Amino acid sequence: MNRTEFIIATAIILFVAFALGWFASWLVNRFTRVTKAEIGELDKMAQALHEAEETRDQAIIYLQQREAEITNQLSQTEAELRAAMDGLREARQETEELRSYIERQNIG
């Protein structure tokens, strides 16, 4: 094989490799092409996702407001409980003082 035949054989091999690569690229592009229906479906999915995110955000805001309300109610209830316990403690002390006063009066 002389130099010219080698160059021609190399050129043919490179051309065949190029043609096979181009054909493979065309096949991949043909099978992975996105149709208008698929684009429409993607748009619908994007819209549904956006609406779901908005709903989630609204739910989070509602839960935060509800948590604040419940926390406020809890703190009010705890304050009322403390006040009731203090009143009960004072009533018990007063009852004990009256009992001891009555016992002293009965003895004396």
Image (spheres, helix red, strand yellow):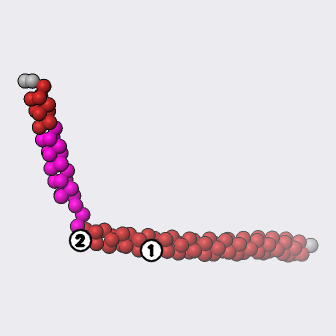
Residue 70 appears in the picture as rendered: no
Extreme residue toward the left, this view = 1
In the structure shown, which secondary structural element does the residue marked by tag 1 occupy?
A: helix
Say left or right for 99 vs 23: right
Is 98 drawn above or below residue 28 in the view shown?
A: below
Q: Which residue is mark 2?
A: 37
**What amino acid is labelled 1 in the image?**
Thr
Mark 1 crowd level (few <14, some 14–19, many ≥20, 10 Å Cα):
few
Residue 12 position in % (x across, y down): 11, 37
Nearest the eye: 35 or 57: 35
Is 6 drawn above or below residue 23 in the view shown?
A: above
Residue 15 appears in the picture as rendered: yes
Say left or right for 11 vs 72: left
Residue 40 position in % (x across, y down): 28, 72
Residue 26, numbered label: none
Residue 29 position in % (x across, y down): 21, 56
Extreme residue toward the front, this view = 4
What residue is drawn where x is 41% and y is 74%? 51
What residue is drawn where x is 11% and y is 29%? 4
Nearest the eye: 62 or 107: 62
Q: Earlier in the sequence, mark 2 or mark 1?
A: 2
Mark 2 crowd level (few <14, some 14–19, many ≥20, 10 Å Cα):
few
Q: Is residue 19 magenta?
A: yes
**What amino acid is labelled 2 in the image?**
Ala
Q: CA distance from mark 2 to mark 1?
A: 27 Å
Residue 55, numbered label: 1
Residue 48 image-quadrant placement: bottom left
Which is more foreground, mark 2 or mark 1?
Answer: 2
Extreme residue toward the top, this view = 1
Magenta residues, as a range?
13-37
Residue 18 image-quadrant placement: top left
